[in-house]
């Protein structure tokens, strides 16, 4: 019989523990799954694809770095983010500058971890999450996610809910 293997908490999870934010850690990487496997996994976890959010890092012409958290099923509207954040223009941080700006590689950005490392970076959650009991964000490592209450998280890290996303066109 195998012994229980203790999984090391990510920096973001350690930060959530310190901030007393409840979360559930999941090993989930739907990008590496086929459509049927993805659907089966999400069904087993009682999660919709729209419950999974991506954390994006941008630069505002007035604010400098800022963070947007939106559903993976939608696209970010940089114009809406600019309006919500008091910028005239926002643009994605180039991939070559992402790790030195946020501390994370592409696909592993976590709003709590970024907040801990850079507390002055404004963080915005798409308003779609405001009425949800939970959303999933990267746990700070590829293939790991954390299930968190967005309202509790917003209060603890000072995130603002705003209209940020537009529907994807398939």
Image (cartoon, helix red, strand yellow):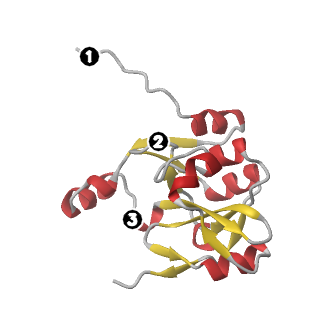
From the image, tell me which residue sits under label 3.
Answer: 49
**On the picture, is 30 further left or further right than 159?**
left
Residue 34 to residue 18: above or below = below
Report the residue at 63% width, 43% height from top: 113
Residue 59 to residue 96: above or below = below
From the image, tell me which residue sits under label 2.
Answer: 141
Instruction: Say which quadrant the N terminus sits in.
Output: top left
CA neighbours of label 2 inside 10 A, class few (<14), some (14 to 19), many (20+): some
Kindly report the distance in space between the C-alpha atoms of the residues bearing marks 1 and 3.
33 Å
Quick one: SS at disc 2? loop
Kindly report the distance in space between the C-alpha atoms of the residues bearing marks 1 and 2.
25 Å
CA neighbours of label 1 inside 10 A, class few (<14), some (14 to 19), many (20+): few
Quick one: SS at disc 3? helix
From the image, tell me which residue sits under label 1.
Answer: 2
Q: Earlier in the sequence, mark 1 or mark 2?
A: 1
Comparing 70 with 127, the one in front is 70
Comparing 101 with 143, the one in front is 101
Q: Earlier in the sequence, mark 1 or mark 3?
A: 1
Report the residue at 66% width, 42% height from top: 21
Report the residue at 47% width, 75% height from top: 74
Dot in front, 1 or 2: 2
Q: Which mark is residue 88?
A: none
**Contact, mark 1 vs mark 2 (Cβ under 8 Å):** no
Comparing 104 with 129, the one in front is 104
Q: Earlier in the sequence, mark 2 or mark 3?
A: 3
Dot in front, 2 or 3: 2
Residue 135 to residue 50: above or below = above
């Amino acid at each position: 019989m195998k012994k229980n293997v203790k999984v090391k908490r990510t920096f973001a999870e350690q930060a959530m523990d310190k901030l007393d934010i409840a979360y559930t850690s999941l090993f989930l990487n739907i990008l590496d799954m086929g459509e049927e496997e993805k659907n089966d996994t999400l069904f087993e976890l009682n999660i919709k694809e729209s419950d999974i959010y991506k954390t994006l890092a941008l630069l505002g012409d007035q604010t400098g770095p800022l963070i947007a958290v939106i559903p993976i099923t939608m696209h970010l509207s940089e114009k809406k983010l600019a309006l919500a954040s008091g910028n005239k223009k926002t643009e994605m941080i180039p991939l070559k500058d992402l790790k030195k700006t946020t501390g994370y590689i592409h696909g592993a950005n976590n709003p709590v971890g970024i907040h801990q490392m850079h507390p002055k970076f404004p963080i915005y959650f798409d308003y779609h999450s405001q009425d949800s009991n939970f959303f999933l964000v990267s746990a700070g490592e590829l293939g790991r996610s954390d299930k968190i209450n967005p309202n509790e998280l917003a209060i603890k890290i000072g995130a603002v809910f705003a209209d940020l996303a537009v529907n994807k066109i398939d």
